């Protein structure tokens, strides 16, 4: 388990989520089918699964990308792969899109 949380004074370890689980979480928590392209959902899910497996990081990247799209293009715009790439670069200091597509195996 790479992620742990505290419950009172006791640490509770959580196993890392796989990419498919993270994609399901993103869709369930945000209604991503309407706001994110299918490729963007897959990219952010695979990226976060490869780096952390932490659903909180998934939602952080998605939120950052969505806010940027809203600010730049307005409410009717869809978050795409380039937006996820820019958000991950901003948050983690890494180019994600091309590398993740080439190296991230589905989990």
Image: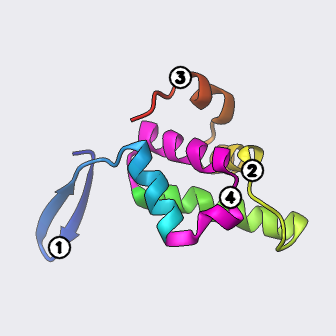
Q: For the stretch drawn in magenta, what is the main secondary structure?
A: helix
In what quadrant of the picture does the N terminus appear? top left
Residue 35: in magenta span? yes
Mark 1 falls on what kind of element?
Answer: strand
> Horizontally, is 8 left or right of 15 in the view?
left
Q: Badge 3 is on which residue?
A: 103
Comparing labels 3 and 4, the label whose residue is closer to the camera:
4
Comparing labels 1 and 3, the label whose residue is closer to the camera:
3
Label 4 close to label 2 by CB (< 8 Å): yes
Residue at figure coordinates x 67%, y 43% from the top left? 89
Residue with the most extreme bottom position = 8
The residues tagged by marks 1 and 4 sit, at their Cα atoms, a distance apart of: 33 Å
Image quarter of residue 32: bottom right
Comparing labels 1 and 2, the label whose residue is closer to the camera:
2
**Residue closest to the eye, 56 or 30:** 30
The residues tagged by marks 1 and 3 sit, at their Cα atoms, a distance apart of: 35 Å
Where is residue 25 shown, x and y percent of the image? 44, 61
The residues tagged by marks 3 and 2 sit, at their Cα atoms, a distance apart of: 19 Å
Q: Badge 1 is on which residue?
A: 7
The residues tagged by marks 1 and 2 sit, at their Cα atoms, a distance apart of: 36 Å
Residue at figure coordinates x 60%, y 29% from the top left? 101
- Compare marks 1 and 2 and give the one earlier in the sequence: 1
Q: How many marks?
A: 4
Q: Which mark is residue 76?
A: none
Mark 2 falls on what kind of element?
Answer: loop
**Is residue 95 shown to the viewer in this render?**
no
């Amino acid at each position: 388990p790479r992620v742990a949380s505290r419950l009172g004074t006791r640490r509770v370890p959580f196993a890392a989520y796989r990419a498919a689980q993270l994609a399901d979480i993103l869709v369930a928590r945000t209604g991503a089918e309407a706001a994110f392209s299918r490729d963007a959902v897959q990219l952010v899910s695979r990226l976060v699964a490869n780096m952390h497996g932490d659903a909180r990081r998934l939602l952080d990247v998605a939120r950052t990308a969505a806010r940027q799209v809203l600010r730049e293009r307005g409410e009717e715009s869809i978050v795409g792969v380039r937006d996820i790439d820019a958000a991950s670069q901003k948050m983690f200091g890494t180019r994600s899109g091309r590398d993740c597509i080439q190296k991230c195996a589905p989990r």
